[in-house]
Image (tube, helix red, strand yellow):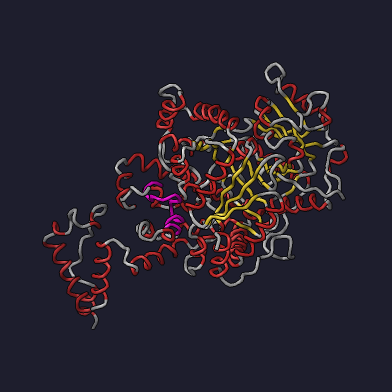
Amino acid sequence: MNSRDKILDTVKKNQPDHRELPPLPGTVAGTAMPPAGGSVADLTHAFTTVLEAIGGTAYLVSGFDRIATILREQFPREQHPHIVSGCPELSGWAGAPDRNADPHTLENIDLAVLRAHFGVAENGACWITEERMIHRALPFITQHLALVIDHKDIVANMHEAYDRIAGLEAGTTGEAGLTDGVGVEAGVSTSYGFGTFIAGPSKTADIEQSLVLGAHGPRSLIVFLLDAAISDAGFY
Amino acid sequence: MSENKKDHAALAEEFNKDEPRVDWHDQTLWWIRQKRDKAAHQVPEWEDLRNLASGIKENVLSDLSGYLRQFEEQATRNGIVVHWAADAAEHNEIVYSLLQRKGVDKMVKSKSMLTEECHLNEYLAQKGIEVIDTDLGERVVQLAGEPPSHIVLPCIHKKKEEIGEIFHEHLGTPAGNADPQFLTHAARLHLREKFLTRRVALTGVNFAVAETGEFVVCTNEGNADMGAHLADMHIACMGIEKLIPQRRHLGVFLRLLTRSATGQPITTYSSHFRKPRPGQEMHIVFVDNGRSAHLGKKDFRSSLKCIRCAACFNTCPVYRRSGGHSYHTAVAGPIGSILSPNLDMKKYADLPFASTLCGSCSNVCPVKIDIHEQLYKWRQVIVQEGYAPAAKTVALKTMNWVLSNPSVYRAAGKTGRWFMLNVPFTVNNGLNAWYRQRDMPAPPRQSFGEWYKKNKS
């Protein structure tokens, strides 16, 4: 008998009597946790607070013009010549890398600006799948990373996050960002080959528990929260 | 560590020779335990989450064969090649054959305690394959020629000055520089070159989802992703117990894992690998290595629910004061002490005794494993099977005889009190193991039994 059959046989023989799978919050009324819910403003506030606590930065912005202004200030071309963007709205300022290029050619990227799907208030993470990364390696190899989401696309916790991912895959959930022409359209089912939650910049505390940002991946992470209704005037 | 014949007590004694270091180690880990508490207390439904996680894992163990088949089918459909290894040797051979087929003699590896358990690095070194560990802590211990001392914080036992010295010797950093920021940057540059030049990357697996055939790898550094996305071949190695039924169950486990481990709300990266990228090869190696047999042991099977957060390490008064290396096994701490005897009862017979049975481990466990109860049960199995140290066996047998014979018990008490009162040096000496770290108590003039007889009227 080969190892596969031997393992499966022994497991089957030794596994205990069937135990039911417990229902998850939200799937059966009145069980476990109530849905966290919360208003858009509450979720934005919670997301921003957690993101800053884990070493990231959040900006609430009116649109991509404002994003370009902030990034131009923080990443002047003289010091950061290699900037790429997966957002068509920024094409005047930074272009997208070639999808078919060898990922090793990304080693000198200084900043990548990518559109993520949504954020999670409880942990400051953003969900992004590979077609938005252009290259799977890009969000990791770039020296600095900026992610863009609509401020309405923030869910309370990880249970809602996986509901949202299931909705995106089934095509039953659209993204608020659709109004900008970049969100996922409801009715179109998508399936990812690779997806990741990114929560803050790459970090380590392996040397005597001293927190250092920028282990192997990005040294900094900015998340832009789009809200067309707000005014940028107060920032000047 | 087959050359290591010392048991936990002897190794802990060595670690305890440097008292300030023990205090530092103890306090560092307790600080992490406190961060875990803070993170857990911010989630009002924390206890519900623990119950859910435990319930989901109970279900997984009860239908593991079904979930393994389901995962294999889905993953294969996704273009991932699934391999099965009955033991450590077969796991190592599979990895080596993949490297050979690719024609490479170098690879990068992110953290995988399974490959530590299988001694993959040593095996591949003998075959002339260079393995670079890319987790910073693992790279430090690899350069130092040591195994990790903690499953989440591999070099928690090292002072920054020692790491500075290791980097000076191997990476050419200036002598005497022990600044964590500087050293981390040096490692970043050193390892970036490895990521860019290695064609095969090996990673561990935190969770594998039966429903979708995808697997999740969690890191803070981004090293698993840097390796996997730049390599032509990604090999992911996992114990067969790492399965979960559905993707939405990740919501429960990802909320618990990092809060329990380091007190962070989530790791920086929680990467979901479902299909290889175009032109890339992706392999999964399922490893049994004693797990299927462990599943058949009613009293001990629930330890297979473990998600490797190491909360039980950080809280354990024995681990904090004896260090990870004193456990002489890949997975140390309380959970390692109940997993290891299953692999080799004789070799690890000392580990279930490396505990005060205080129960703190069980209280912090995110999947509610009854760790301290299993430690207690292992002790009984080990003594029954004749693997307990001779001195302990004689002591326990004697105690059994004394306690089950009332007249002997009374006589022994009387004799003991007489000795301690009149010739205390006969018990207060190095031959008495109990006396080594403790002062003997002042003996009473009479026993409770004698007092009661006199005063009962």
Q: Residue at x 51, y 56 (%)?
A: B364
Q: Position of residue B169 (x, y in %)?
A: 41, 26
Q: Position of residue B182 (x, y in %)?
A: 51, 26
Query: Which residue occupies the foreground of this view, A3 or B51?
Result: A3
Quarter of the figure with residue A141:
top right
Q: Position of residue B410 (x, y in %)?
A: 20, 75
Q: Position of residue A95 (x, y in %)?
A: 79, 26
Which quadrant is the C terminus of chain B positioned in? Answer: bottom left
Residue A199, relative to residue B432: is it above or below? above
Residue B17, relative to residue A70: is it above or below? below
Q: Is residue B55 magenta?
A: no
Magenta stretch: dominant SS?
helix
Query: Which residue occupies the foreground of this view, B125 or B228?
Result: B125
Quarter of the figure with residue B25:
top left
Q: Residue at x 71, y 53 (%)?
A: B77
Q: Residue at x 53, y 55 (%)?
A: B85
Query: Which residue occupies the foreground of this view, B243 or B369?
Result: B243
From this viewpoint, is residue A210 visible?
yes
Query: Which residue occupies the foreground of this view, B81 or B247?
Result: B81
Residue B381, relative to residue B37: is it above or below? below
Q: Residue furthest left?
A: B422
Residue B443, relative to residue B451: is it above or below? above
Quarter of the figure with residue B110:
top right
Q: Residue furthest bottom?
A: B457
Boundaries of the magenta span: B323-340
Q: Is residue B324 magenta?
A: yes
